[in-house]
Image (spheres, rainbow, N blue to C red):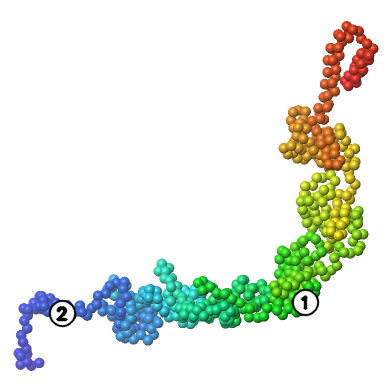
Amino acid sequence: MSKTQQRELPAFDWDRADNKGFGSGYSDADRNRMLEMYDNTLSEVKEKEVVMGTVVGITDREILLNIGFKSDGLVPASEFRDLPDLKMGDEIEVYVENQEDPNGQLVLSRKKAKVITAWQKIQKALDDDLVIDGFVKRRTKGGLIVDIYSVEAFLPGSQIDVKPIRDFDIFVGKKMEVKVVKINYANDNVVVSHKVLIEKDLEAQRAQILNNLEKGQVLEGVIKNMTNFGVFIDLGGVDGLLHITDISWGRISHPSEVLHLDQKVNVVVLDFDEDKKRISLGMKQLQAHPWDALAEDIQVGSKVKGKIVNVADYGAFLEIQPGVEGLIHVSEMSWSQHLRNPQEFLKVGDEVEAVVLTLDRNDRKMSLGIKQLTEDPWTRPELRTKYAVGTKHKGVVRNLTNFGLFLELEEGIDGLVHVSDLSWTKKIKHPSDFIKVGDDLDVVVLELDVDNRRLALGHKQLEENPWDTFETVFAVGTIHRCTILSKNDKMATLELPYGIEGFSSLKNLSKEDGTFAEVGETLDFKVTEFSKEEKRIMLSHTKTWQEKNEPAKEAKAAKATSTKAAPAQAERGATLGDLDALAALKEQMESKN
């Protein structure tokens, strides 16, 4: 620069800039205008909020973002892995953790921003009932895990579809539209549903089906669920129940025997409830009833073959063809008059032959019999000889009653043993005290009535009546050693020799020392009464010791009488008869002493 040019420059006012600091030369108006311009370039930033940031720098380790604050913020590049095409100028949501850390740096986080934004979107989806896209990541116990806005949500198996889903794996790795149905912020838990979307689409279809539904209408459906009592069929948005008894004319124990899940079937509407929207369906009604095809040559007396399909307490059902069954009552299984459990004769699956006893084609009922295939044992001519009165046999106890027991001597031949004919010596109140069902018992025939099919039997008659002998052994006045078995408020039961029982009143149990004999004691008892007809022996312990003292009492009384009579005799003189009486009395007393 030349000197001429230097001289042409305006002179600098050093006084104006002297010691007043940078910018001190501005007027107040200029300073306020500049501050306003600067403030407009910055935005108000609060901590713990999500804001928009612009990418202003990219390195291998960090991303530099401008959020309109006085300084830019750095975010680790690892938080942008889901954005491989990130470039300068892209706008990204970030979370302001700290406006200024100890190093004066603005601290931002895209990861937290994504979480907060996701939960805000999820809440909005719940509030506004929005349909959102999800991605099925994996299956879990009871359902699926679905990613929505990078948050893992639970999709229960029951909310996947309107029909039960048996294979959850087919949905893994696929996109699925869902709705948020529940949020639990305490556990960071979100529950979604895909089923509600389907139900909404099916609502109109369901209403149309119900409006056009009529009894007798034939529909096509898909089996969606199967239970012990029947199957549920999807008719296109509305479910109907096909009861197990309406699946087949034949008897089945479970629907799976003839049907399977997801099978398409034709069904007929049997009944429906418009209010409860319950529909009863039938399948067998689409086929002719098997009874209509029953052969005409099957009549009463005909022999038929079939398979046992059910056994009840009262009998068994024989299926002679699918849908045609006959009842074999337990009384028609054996000629035995004693009814037994049908399971002793038949079981489900047995193939048997039977005779038609009754047949009603209109009511579709049939009764059958098995015992009619064999001869009635009561009609055999040799029966009168084989079971003549006095013949001995062995049988099996089939039933016990209060009055006796029924003994089966052979198939179809039963006899009654009365409780009084079981024992000569013991008084049996109930046959169960003597024997139990299933035991063998030897008997003798007491009475035979072929016309009325009655046979009276006895067990004690196999031995001679011991009471003929007991009459001499236990004569009145004899003394025996007995044991007290039991006592009640009136009588005591005693065990006598030979195992027979006797009885004693309670007052006759008094002992010489003033006490009374108790159960279990063995003492001498005197027979006071014997009844052969009633088989009863009455005894007394008291009399055994009372009678020992009677001779002494009699002697004492006689001595007192003789003392009083002596003076009178002396006065009138002793006679020969008196002397003989005294001598006899003396001799009697001496012999007793």
Q: Is residue 421 left or right of residue 32?
A: right
Where, by quadrant of the figure, is residue 327 drawn? bottom right
Q: Is residue 388 visible?
A: yes
**Nearest to viewer (mark 2 / mark 1):** 1
Q: Is residue 205 left or right of residue 299?
A: left
Q: Which mark is residue 298?
A: 1
The number of discs equals 2
**Going by the picture, which residue comes out furthest to the front?**
362
**Secondary structure of the residue carrying numbered label 2:** helix
- Give the residue displayed 80% in from the left and 74% down from the top: 302
**Which residue lies under the disc numbered 2?**
34
Residue 360: image location, x then y, percent: 73, 73
C-alpha distance separating marks 2 and 1: 117 Å
Q: Is residue 227 left or right of residue 97?
A: right
Between 13 and 325, which is closer to the camera in this rendering? 325
Between 69 and 460, which is closer to the camera in this rendering? 460
**Secondary structure of the residue carrying numbered label 1:** loop
Instruction: Tell me the quarter of the image containing the C terminus.
Output: top right
Residue 209: image location, x then y, percent: 51, 80
- Give the residue displayed 50% in from the left and 72% down from the top: 275
Between 527 and 339, which is closer to the camera in this rendering? 339
